[in-house]
Image (spheres, rainbow, N blue to C red):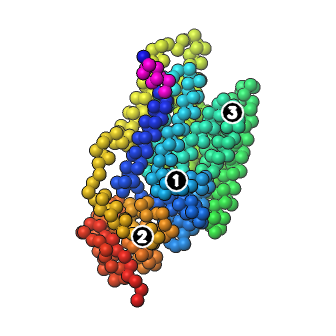
Amino acid sequence: MKLINFLKKNAIWILIIFFGLLYALWSVNRHNHFQTDAIDLGIFDQPMWLWSRFKVPLSTVKWNQYPGAHILGDHFHPILIIFSFLFRIWDDVRVLLLAQAVFVALAVYPIYLTANKILKSSALALSISFSYLSFIGVQSAIDYDFHETALAVLPLSLALYAVTFEKWRLYFVSFFLGLLFKEDMPLMFAGIGLFSSLKWLKDKQKGKRVIFGLLTVVLSMIYYFSVTKVFIPYFKNGEPWQYEELDPRIGETTVDLIKTFFTRPWVVFQVMFSPSLKVKTMTNYFASFGFIPFLSPFSVFMLLPNFIGRFLTDLPQRWLIRFQYSVNIVPALAYGTIFGIKSTMGKLRGLGVMWGKRFTLLLPFFIVFCSLFQTYRTNTPLFRMLDWRNYQSQDRFAINYKLLSLIPKDASVMAQSAFVPHLSHREIVYRYEDNLIDTGKPEYVLMSLDESSDPPYVKIDLESKIEILRKNMNYQEIYWDGTRLLMKRKAQQ
């Protein structure tokens, strides 16, 4: 009996700890097995390490040149300055992976509190929490290195909790901190502000939610244009921000998008839903929560910033579930599920239909089933995370680590992209490029036929590139076993 009571009382923390540990273990395991990459773990790690040493965060990984450009000229994420001091606790890139897992897992707690209070059902609250933690977009983000977007789910989740229960101090702390995570975060908060304004527009007792929602939209848009038109170009030596990547039929900038929306709205809708892959991806998101968010239509507005930034572009990689692009919509989907269930309960009661015990018992199982079924359908990595065979070490890993240990910590290096996150705590580290050995003149070069590369070279290409490197008379071989190559630049005569 005591055990049952303990489990009931602490079920949400058991979920948080389980998924937090699972995601942390998987992330670190990927890194240990050389499955992380220069893009994007190395890109984040090097400038953050420089910040932690009170140096200018110039990234040689991102631009493959020395000195690299300021990392805030790529994406504007000053919050990472704070996270960079984790390296003062543990000077290892793995600390970023652990922090990401913790933030993603903890972000479910405000969702659980909201669901429990509004729906008055711990079973429903736990099932929605499970769907958040096992969401296909969360899995994909954890499976793709480290991103500030994944960290941002915590301020988004806290902001939604705060606006729901009118905890305005918490709301504005979450809002202003959340803006610092990335340049697209003000758009996500604008979606929250729009949701708050529309959902409670007719409720005179909820006037603050409408006012603060509209204020959020205004402040968010001011901040967004300030960052993309002023701050990023400043750190980029006057060059414009480059990540809008809109479909040419719409234009080039956000201003073009706004003009097209009002003058040729059919073009915007055509681009948004074509090709069909975009619709398939959107459908998979809603299916993960049993399509329940549609029962709270205003909740869908919170997804628009993410959908606009992805499905109106001409970049096919953004149309997929993969990578980090889907993780920041999960708080909105979870809250949409909560309000969708609440709305349906109210309508049923208004018709004189009581929300029966059977429905109460079945709905949590349905929500959990939908999440697991979507994991299976989309082949996202949750089930692979639970397979112990994926955690087994291989002999080649020990050889890789031996070669890494032979490279001095302050030496410049050019390496295959799978090695870069293991070498990025230094001022000069490059991803492999054909001509970089002559232009960058790295002191060390590390390559392998067994590890991944970005761009993704097939084995025959890697063999050719390694053979060319071995013929370079300016370098001497330190190690070559037919698969792995470590070279050192010869001393100048």
Disc 3 + disc 1, Cβ < 8 Å: no
Q: Which mark is residue 402?
A: none
Residue at 30% x, 80% y: name it: 471
Residue at 36% x, 69% y: name it: 406
- The residue indicated by pointer 1 is 89
Q: Say what secondary structure mark 1 lies in.
A: loop
Label 2: few (<14), some (14–19) or many (≥20) C-alpha neighbours in 10 Å: few
Question: Magenta span covers which residues?
Answer: 2-10
**What amino acid is found at the position of numbered circle 2 in the picture?**
Pro
CA separation, marks 1 and 2? Answer: 22 Å
Quarter of the C terminus within the rendering: bottom left
Residue 229 or 319: which is nearer the viewer?
229
**What amino acid is found at the position of numbered circle 1 in the picture?**
Ile
The residue sitting at the top extreme is 352
CA separation, marks 3 and 1? Answer: 33 Å
Q: Is residue 398 left or right of residue 455?
A: left
